[in-house]
Amino acid sequence: MFADYAFYTSSYGGSVLSEASFPSYANRATAYLDSIMPAVPDPAPDELKMAMCAVADEMLKDAAGQAGIQSENTDGYSVTYVTPLSAKRRYYDLAAQFLAGTDLMGRWI
């Protein structure tokens, strides 16, 4: 796990994950990032920690069935979805926001 819950709430500004659910999603996000990076630095730079937090948040949305929702109206029950992307593509795009300009992501992906 690249970041702890204190980093998630303070530096990243996260509020979606609870402290109890954080380790599970953070570990899954870390495993995903490990799979797209040619090398994992130790210690992890803040850009990598931020990417892990963003991917963990998105994984929770997937698990809750909220991924891809652009807007929702409860009065007339209307849900608008964004153009569907695969989960891996969304995770990659989120990671790229934080890791672009670093040597952490492989160019072949």
Image (spheres, rainbow, N blue to C red):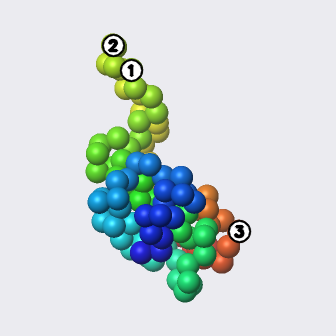
In the foreground, 9 or 62: 9
Residue 68 relative to residue 44: left or right: left
Residue 41, percent from left and from top: 56, 84
Looking at the picture, which amino acid does disc 1 mark?
Asn
The answer, for residue 22, to whether it is visible in the render is yes
What kind of element bears circle 3? loop
Label disc, if present, on residue 73 of the rendered structure: 1
**Image height of 87 relative to 51, above or below:** above
Residue at 61% over, 58% down: 97
Q: CA distance from mark 1 to mark 3?
A: 38 Å
Residue 99, percent from left and from top: 62, 67
Looking at the picture, which amino acid does disc 2 mark?
Gly
Residue at 48% over, 52% down: 14
Looking at the picture, which amino acid does disc 3 mark?
Gly
What kind of element bears circle 2? loop
Q: CA distance from mark 1 to mark 2?
A: 6 Å
**Image height of 14 relative to 77, above or below:** below
Residue at 39% over, 20% down: 73
For label 1, count other residues whose C-alpha is less than 10 Å away and answer few (under 14), some (14-19) or many (20+): few
Q: CA distance from mark 3 to mark 2?
A: 44 Å
Quarter location, residue 22:
bottom left
Q: Are marks 1 and 2 in contact (CB under 8 Å)?
A: yes
Residue 47, percent from left and from top: 61, 68
For label 3, count other residues whose C-alpha is less than 10 Å away and answer few (under 14), some (14-19) or many (20+): few
Residue 101 relative to residue 63: left or right: right
**Image height of 96 relative to 37, above or below:** above
Label disc, if present, on residue 55 of the rendered structure: none
Label disc, if present, on residue 101 of the rendered structure: 3
Label disc, if present, on residue 76 of the rendered structure: 2
Residue 49, percent from left and from top: 53, 68
